[in-house]
Amino acid sequence: MRSYRDLMTVPGAAAFVAAGFIGRIPMSMRTLGCLLMVESLTGSYTLGGAVAGTFGLSNAFTAPFLARLADRRGQRPVILWSTLVHTCGILAIVLAAESGMPSWTYFPLAILAGASALPLGSLVRARWNAVLNDGKRMQTAYALEAVLDDVVYIVGPLLVVWLAVDIFPSAGLIGAITLTVGGSLVMATLRRSEPTIHPDADLPRIGVIRMRGMPLLTCGYLATGTLLGTADVAVLNFADTQGESGRAGLLLALMIVGSMIAGFAFGLVNWKLTAARQLLLTNVLLCLTMAPLVFVDSMAAMYGFVVLSGVGISPVLITGSTVVGSIVPRQALAEGFAVVGSALTLGMSAGNAIAGTLADLGGSRLAFIFVVGFGALAALTTAVGGRSFTPAPEEPASITATVME
């Protein structure tokens, strides 16, 4: 516990952690809020899912570019402008749906809202790198952020469902944008912890995705995201086939609880292994903790094993963040975190789609087999890329040496 308390004594840390947490609760609310609002007002789950998917994909593709802009122009102006555009986009979707406008109008508005949603988690992690110089404390900071992300994915869905179902259909999105504006505006005022703005000449001329180590790391995140997306749907299908569909949400919450506990504990340990070796071992752990789900055949057993399956999630994401922090120059860190975050999101979307087909073909057991397979793929990708996960040079003049030839 002392490690986490010490982090909060770093000047400015408590403020940007709190603001970042509030501002990113909506990342687990917006797509679900779109689906619930559109379905409630039009009666079509298909249309609601399509609008939500459009929002999510546009956000995944543009997040690295917004983060890159924050690295180059500073976080404050990017936060302010993106929040303004994002707010207009969300309110426009709400207005279009509530006023009964043609359904095709929802899609360009969803693209606008999704494309302007800032990856606040990436900006927060970049701030930690700006205020800390201690590698051990950096890993604890990443652990804290991973635990907060887990909390976000418990609180957000519960909040948006309550608002959209019990208050009124668009209340979920209105609540999400309220939190976004509040957290983002506070972040924009916290200039003391904002990373230093570097001239364009000091920054890589091409995207972070092409830097040494990043292609394989991004592929690993894509595989991990596919694992998580497949596991979510497989758990839902398992509960449904057991006649306990109402308990599916509890099972997913227990998986996140397992991840939270493991992430919190992981951040307390002073690991002696390199970040690359930690990433490989945590990927293997994730694969192994997911494996028992293939053989579970009762709800009673699933309650325990689903907690175990979550134990490997946060450690993978924590060590992945540590690797990003070591191979991406400090001047481009927000973009680096956004790239792997987008890969994770795209993987989860793909996993959702894949698992649905697998569940129809062979039930949840077949889907869980593929979960383990994606875990093995992530571990293999990490093993292959291990040597490229080396610290990035600190001097601006040598930044171009980290770019793949």
Image (spheres, rainbow, N blue to C red):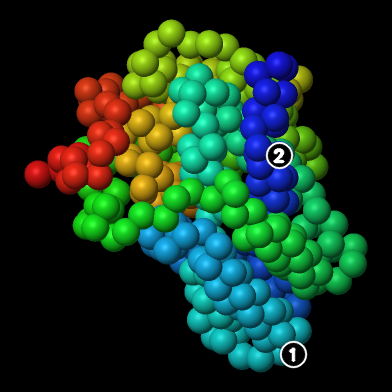
- How far separated are the C-alphas under marks 1 and 2? 42 Å
Three-letter amino acid code at the position of disc 2 = Ala
Q: Does residue 84 lie above or below 14 as drawn?
A: below
Left or right: where 5 falls relative to 364? right
* Residue 193 placement (x, y as % from top left): 58, 46
**Which of these two is toward me, 44 or 190?**
190
Residue 124 visible (yes or no): yes
Left or right: where 60 falls relative to 172? left
Seen at 38% across and 36% down, the residue is: 324
- On residue 14, the disc is 2
Residue 260 visible (yes or no): no
Say few, some or many: other residues with alpha carbon within 10 Å of mark 1 (under 14 / 14 to 19 / 20 or more): few
**Which of these two is toward me, 178 or 197?**
197
Left or right: where 204 falls relative to 165? left
Three-letter amino acid code at the position of disc 1 = Ser
How many marks the image carries: the answer is: 2
**Which of these two is toward me, 110 or 179?**
179
Secondary element at tag 2: helix
Residue at which label 1 appears: 99
Say few, some or many: other residues with alpha carbon within 10 Å of mark 2 (under 14 / 14 to 19 / 20 or more): few
- Quadrant where the N terminus lies? top right
Of discs 1 and 2, which sits in the foreground?
2
- On residue 330, the disc is none
